Image: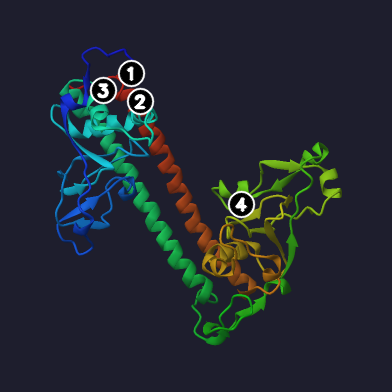
Amino acid sequence: MNDLVPEGWKKVTLASISNIIMGQSPSSETYNDKRLGLPFFQGKADFGSHYPKVRVWCSEPSKIANKGAILFSVRAPVGDINLSDCECCIGRGLAAISGDKVVQSYLYQTIKLVKSEFQLLAQGSTFEAINGSELRGFKLTIPPLPEQQKIATILTSIDDVIEKTQLQINKLKDLKTGMMQELLTRGVGIDGEPHTEFKDSPKWTTGKISEITKIPLSWELVNINDVARLESGHTPSRDNVEYWGGEYQWLSLHDTKELNTPIIKKTKLSITQAGLDNSSARLLPIGTVAFSRTASVGHCVMFGKSMATSQDFANYVCGEKLSPRYLLQLFRWMQHVWNRLSEGSTHKTIYMPTFKKLQILLPPIKEQFKIADIIESIDNDINKSIGKLYQYKNLKKALMHDLLTGKVRVNVD
């Protein structure tokens, strides 16, 4: 924060407006998972989005934080905070801050705002930590109590909306997980009626029959290569500038990591016709499903336009019996299968020969469309809620800067 103080505000040290308790780790013999004593929080690893998550209890606590105290991380990462929702024991990675001459909820918000300043202060130490004297002497600029209360009320109300929106997103994701399990194993039925007849089928992975499962009578267990064409990707020479910056999109792992939607039309890098002609890279059609088989194994996207990919992808061009929309959702659901098939300790990989014997469940094409419609509908609801969440968070960020610095003053009448 700068040195200019808004009219009516004052610059104070944290110790002058609050009680600060530095944490201390009790004997490890007093730790337990039997709920004996108080919840024990040791540092940032115990933090949740708002309140800490109890993993360990302590039967003989050394330092105790009251309910409602601000739990402040004094070790890397310095400055992260949570609120204690109960009386608890704190270890040496935390400090507990309780407002004395300041509105506690306002203090919580303003400490959030100046997190970067705490981090700058901590960089001067060997282990990126902040000690008790530095924390107590840290200076804040605060308004009169009525203004503190009004600002805190505004910011807390937005926090409530953010939390409710996040809960809504979590519920939709849980709904999607349950729906995908049902839809991709038992289907949606025929003409609005659920399937009533089922048959035995080998558990589908890579042709290894390990157990029997039930599938709808009209479904098939097929080798994916019987209904889709497998294409590998390739990277043109990086040393030749004539191969890059052309008219053709080129998919890399960086594109799938940051993608918010499974449909991709624009990539970070592009290649030229010369790049295609002088490498094994091939231009694949719209609707191709690209599967990340290295590093972030299991990330998959569908082409919104024709493009090529790196060798990190296994690409499927679907035939008339397989909908790419269905295959995309099926692959996204099959993460448990990909985890079993990936090899390597440091960098996980699924090698191309595995895809040559991959089996999938194949409903009739009309049912594939219906399954994709239902899952995409839930995806749309999730994305709308995520969009709202970003808006609320951006609003909160802007209001924190305006209200907690005095740039915009609130009316307390």
Q: Residue at x 15, y 50 (%)?
A: 61
Sort mark 3 into few (<14), some (14-19) or many (20+) by Cα contacts within 10 Å: some
Query: Relative to 255, does residue 115 appear above or below in the rendering?
Result: above
Q: CA distance from mark 3 to mark 1?
A: 15 Å
Judging depth in this view, the residue of 312 and 203 nearest the camera is: 312
Q: Secondary structure at mark 3?
A: strand
Q: Amino acid at mark 3?
A: Leu
Q: Amino acid at mark 4?
A: Ile
Instruction: Name the residue carrying label 3.
Output: 140
Question: First in sequence: mark 1 or mark 2?
Answer: 2
Instruction: Name the residue carrying label 4.
Output: 263
Q: Looking at the picture, how far across and down is residue 388, in whole percent?
A: 42, 42
Q: Is residue 141 visible?
A: yes
Pointers 1 and 2 in contact (C-beta within 8 Å): yes
Q: Residue at x 62, y 79 (%)?
A: 221
Q: Secondary structure at mark 4?
A: strand
Instruction: Name the residue carrying label 1.
Output: 407
Question: First in sequence: mark 3 or mark 2?
Answer: 3
Quadrant of the image containing the C terminus: top left
Instruction: Determine whether, in the image, residue 325 is placed left or right of residue 100.
Output: right
Q: CA distance from mark 4 to mark 3?
A: 47 Å
Q: Amino acid at mark 2?
A: His
Sort mark 4 into few (<14), some (14-19) or many (20+) by Cα contacts within 10 Å: some
Q: Secondary structure at mark 2?
A: helix
Pointers 4 and 1 in contact (C-beta within 8 Å): no
